[in-house]
Image (cartoon, coloured by chain):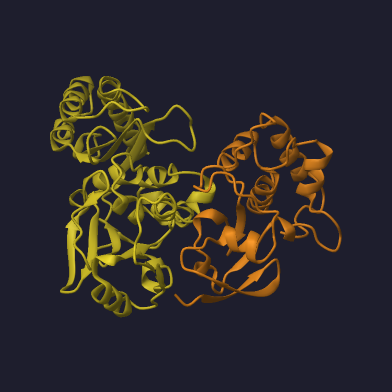
Chain colours: A yellow, B orange
């Protein structure tokens, strides 16, 4: 195995072009190094992107949102006052990934590209309406975050492509998000099911915008447009929550595994979604 | 495959080593540099026995590729004690008998030192969450939490943080 450490995006693209699918991108390494050591992956080369300066930054976008570089760690996100204020649900999803030691290294972009159905940061990024910037041989393209993962360990990224950043849209007033998951252990565990909600209220408390996303109840994290639509135009009263929960239940297509049965996951996902709505509502109104 | 030459700072001293791309920082610390205080438990980032401080944050050395250490500042458990003697966290672990077999202890102490540097007065809940990535199969954790609380109460605990 070779190790590359480019310091510019141009060099990174050149390495990708030269080595094709044999080169695997290394950011935090908390999934990749485990997979290499377990013999699940044997890349010809790894390309460490942590020395490419713009990939290690959290910056404002021109539209007034946030851009999170592909090499930004969970610990850096949790310590960022602007992200904590605008996207508390995303920060809590990121903060649930592994231990403090894992947080020191793991990146949400890596969490996305590893394409685990239970990735804790991904439902929150989907609910946030995040956009992924992908640099390839033909330049930059951008895709909605929900289009990256295709199934367990599978993404829509093509050979020679590199995710450079994820952007979050500008925050409207009275907006907030929340992410909740169920795990047997509070820390160091993998979601049995997870739900993220992002919403905006008007001055009267009526919901004017909502996105609901689920984790660990399908081969990939899901956007559930019907669940968000059930909330828009309502005061988030019990009828609206019931319709939202029904849409969540209908979207669930989980498997049985050691963490939980399909029946249990389908039962708990709408409960988590209801609680996430309540939490996001409280935050948005505050 | 030619070996990779890495220059790094370990426990305050500039250190050079040769490695291959797939080597981990943990294997270099233990097998190349002879710093065997850092332990290998699971080798997959779950147990925290290999916790070291790298560039100001605690990481699992088993999940860091050795070439990533180029230019980094690393502190292992061997760097905790200074000329003035043991670090308050080390003393507290001894005084509260916060270990049995001792295999997890270096990782716990590296993690606990970083916690107290960031948060001098952590609650029990904060201690338990911070140390959730360090597994101990002997103590039941209670004495470890008491040790960290004791170290937090000790004057001069920031002397070497």
Which residue occupies 41% across, 30% down? A183
Number of marks drawn: 0
* Nearer to us in this view, B71 or A140: B71
Q: Residue B13's x, y, as percent?
A: 71, 73
Residue at x-position 73% and y-position 61% = B79
Residue A269 in the figure: left or right of residue B114: left
Q: Is B13 placed above or below B87 here? A: below
Residue A9 appears at what percent x and percent y? 31, 76
Residue A70 is at least partly visible in this image = no
Rendered-image quadrant of the C terminus of chain A = top left
Q: Percent position (x, y) of residue A126?
A: 24, 46
Q: Which residue does the image show at 64% across and 71% down from the upper left?
A: B9
> Quick check: A216 above or below A52?
above
**In screen coordinates, is B145 left or right of A29?**
right
Give the left or right position of residue A172, taking residue B84 as reference.
left
From this viewpoint, is residue A212 visible? Answer: yes
x, y percentage for residue A111? 35, 50
The image quarter in which residue A229 lies: top left
Q: Is residue B99 left or right of residue A101?
A: right
Task: Point out the residue furthest to the right here.
Answer: B84
Q: Nearer the viewer, residue A175 or B139?
A: B139
Q: Quadrant of residue A96?
A: top left
In the image, residue B85 above or below residue A124: below
Q: Nearer the viewer, residue A98 or A212?
A: A98
From the image, which quarter does the N terminus of chain A lie in? bottom left
């Amino acid at each position: 195995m070779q190790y590359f450490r480019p310091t510019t995006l141009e060099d990174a693209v050149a390495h990708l072009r030269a080595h094709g699918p044999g080169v695997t991108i290394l950011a935090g390494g908390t999934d990749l190094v485990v997979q290499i050591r377990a013999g699940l992956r044997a890349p010809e080369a790894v390309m460490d992107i942590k020395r490419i300066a713009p990939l290690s930054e959290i910056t404002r976008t021109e539209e007034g949102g946030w851009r999170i570089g592909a090499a930004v760690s969970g610990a850096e996100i949790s310590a960022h006052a602007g992200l904590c204020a605008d996207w508390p649900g995303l920060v809590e999803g990121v903060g649930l990934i592994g231990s403090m030691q894992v947080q020191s290294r793991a990146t949400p972009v890596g969490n996305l590209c590893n394409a685990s159905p239970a990735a804790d940061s991904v439902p929150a990024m989907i609910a946030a309406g995040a956009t992924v910037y992908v640099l390839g041989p033909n330049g930059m393209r951008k895709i909605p975050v929900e289009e990256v993962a295709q199934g367990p360990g599978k993404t829509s990224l093509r050979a020679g492509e590199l995710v450079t950043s994820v952007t979050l849209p500008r925050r409207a007033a009275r907006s907030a998000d929340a992410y909740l998951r169920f795990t047997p252990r509070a820390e160091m565990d993998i979601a049995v099911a997870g739900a993220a909600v992002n919403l905006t209220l008007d001055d009267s408390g009526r919901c004017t915008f909502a996105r609901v996303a689920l984790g660990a109840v399908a081969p990939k994290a899901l956007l559930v447009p019907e669940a968000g639509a059930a909330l828009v135009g309502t005061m988030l009263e019990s009828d609206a929550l019931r319709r939202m929960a029904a849409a969540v239940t209908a979207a669930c297509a989980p498997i049985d595994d050691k963490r939980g049965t399909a029946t249990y996951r389908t039962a708990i996902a709408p409960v988590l979604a209801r609680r996430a709505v309540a939490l996001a509502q409280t935050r948005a109104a505050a | 495959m030619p070996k990779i030459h890495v220059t790094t700072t370990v426990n305050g001293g500039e250190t050079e080593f040769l490695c291959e791309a797939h080597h981990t920082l943990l294997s270099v610390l233990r097998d190349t540099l002879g710093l065997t205080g850092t332990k290998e438990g699971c080798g997959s980032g779950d147990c925290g026995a290999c916790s070291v401080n790298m560039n100001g944050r605690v990481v699992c050395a088993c999940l860091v590729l050795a070439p990533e250490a180029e230019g980094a500042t690393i502190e292992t458990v061997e760097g905790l004690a200074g000329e003035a003697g043991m670090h308050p966290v080390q003393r507290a672990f001894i005084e509260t008998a916060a270990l049995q077999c001792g295999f997890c202890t270096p990782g716990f102490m590296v993690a606990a030192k970083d916690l107290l540097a960031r948060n001098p007065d952590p609650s029990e809940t904060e201690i338990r969450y911070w140390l959730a990535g360090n597994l101990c199969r002997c103590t039941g954790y209670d004495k470890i939490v008491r040790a960290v609380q004791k170290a937090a109460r000790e004057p001069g605990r920031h002397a070497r943080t």
